[in-house]
């Protein structure tokens, strides 16, 4: 008790000392959720300290400290937090172009560490079409699941992994991606997307067009 406020204050002071710097707060709603009457006093003090530091970060025009908060529960943010984060940007799900870039980049990165892929341009295009509505994390999960396909196949043939060599493991194919898509579904529902879009219309800075 009492240490949390000091840590918040120290965070902003260190950022100012090391500027230009960025303070990035993931899941900011867990820290700056709407205040309530039954809220613990220590939680209230942390929020108050964070608000004080946010205000202080804007008083000196020469300061170069950027504060970014991300959340998938914007409707649960405290009103005071919403006012202080002046640029409220809705980041939509990746469109087809972004999904293709994510898939190609992941494949390129995995090939650098030794993974093999037997995927042509048509296979990648099919994967892009099948992953409409998937988030970046969902795509990563699909590709991770697909990479287990050759391992599972090898286990069915020879369960003694001590006898395996890299040559025993075949390349990842489109069928592995299809199996991955059967196991990994989109984690973002239509109602959730609608809630984000409605919040963005009310509080967001930019209207995001449908790109897919």
Image (cartoon, helix red, strand yellow):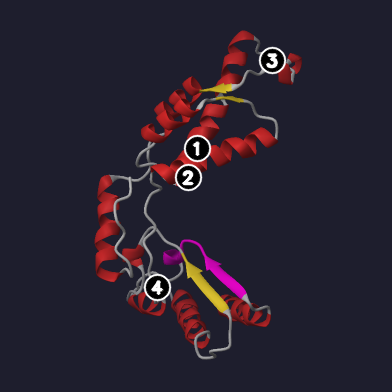
Give the spatial CA distance, label 1 vs label 2.
6 Å
Q: Secondary structure at mark 1?
A: helix
Magenta span of residues: 21-30
User: At 52% across and 30% down in the image, what residue appears?
Assistant: 145
Tell me if residue 71 comes above or below residue 190 in the rendering.
below
User: At 35% across and 42% down in the image, what residue appears?
Assistant: 133
> Which of the two discs, 4 and 2, labels the residue nearer the N terminus?
4
Front-lying residue, 55 or 139: 139
Q: Secondary structure at mark 3?
A: helix
Q: Are circles 4 and 1 on residues that touch, CB within 8 Å?
A: no
User: At 52% across and 83% down in the image, what residue appears?
Assistant: 53
What residue would you read off at disc 3?
Answer: 168
Q: Secondary structure at mark 4?
A: loop
> Which of the two discs, 4 and 1, labels the residue nearer the N terminus?
4
What residue would you read off at disc 2?
Answer: 137
Q: Secondary structure at mark 2?
A: helix
């Amino acid at each position: 008790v009492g240490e949390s406020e000091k840590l918040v204050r120290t965070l902003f002071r260190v950022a100012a000392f090391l500027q230009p710097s960025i303070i990035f707060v993931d899941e900011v709603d867990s820290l700056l959720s709407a205040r309530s009457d039954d809220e613990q006093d220590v939680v209230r003090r942390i929020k108050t300290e964070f608000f004080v530091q946010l205000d202080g970060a804007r008083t000196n025009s020469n300061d170069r400290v950027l504060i970014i908060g991300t959340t998938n529960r914007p409707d649960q943010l405290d009103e005071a937090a919403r006012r202080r984060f002046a640029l409220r940007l809705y980041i939509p799900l990746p469109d087809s172009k972004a999904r293709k870039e994510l898939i190609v980049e992941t494949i390129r990165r995995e090939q650098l560490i030794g993974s093999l892929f037997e995927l042509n341009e048509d296979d990648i295009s099919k994967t892009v079409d099948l992953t409409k509505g998937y988030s970046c994390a969902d795509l990563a999960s699909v590709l991770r699941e697909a990479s287990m396909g050759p391992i599972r196949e090898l286990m069915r043939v020879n369960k003694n992994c001590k006898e395996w060599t890299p040559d025993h493991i075949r390349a990842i194919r489109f069928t592995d991606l299809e199996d991955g898509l059967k196991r990994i579904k989109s984690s973002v529902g239509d109602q959730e997307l609608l809630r984000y879009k409605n919040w963005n219309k009310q509080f967001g800075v930019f209207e995001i067009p449908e790109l897919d």
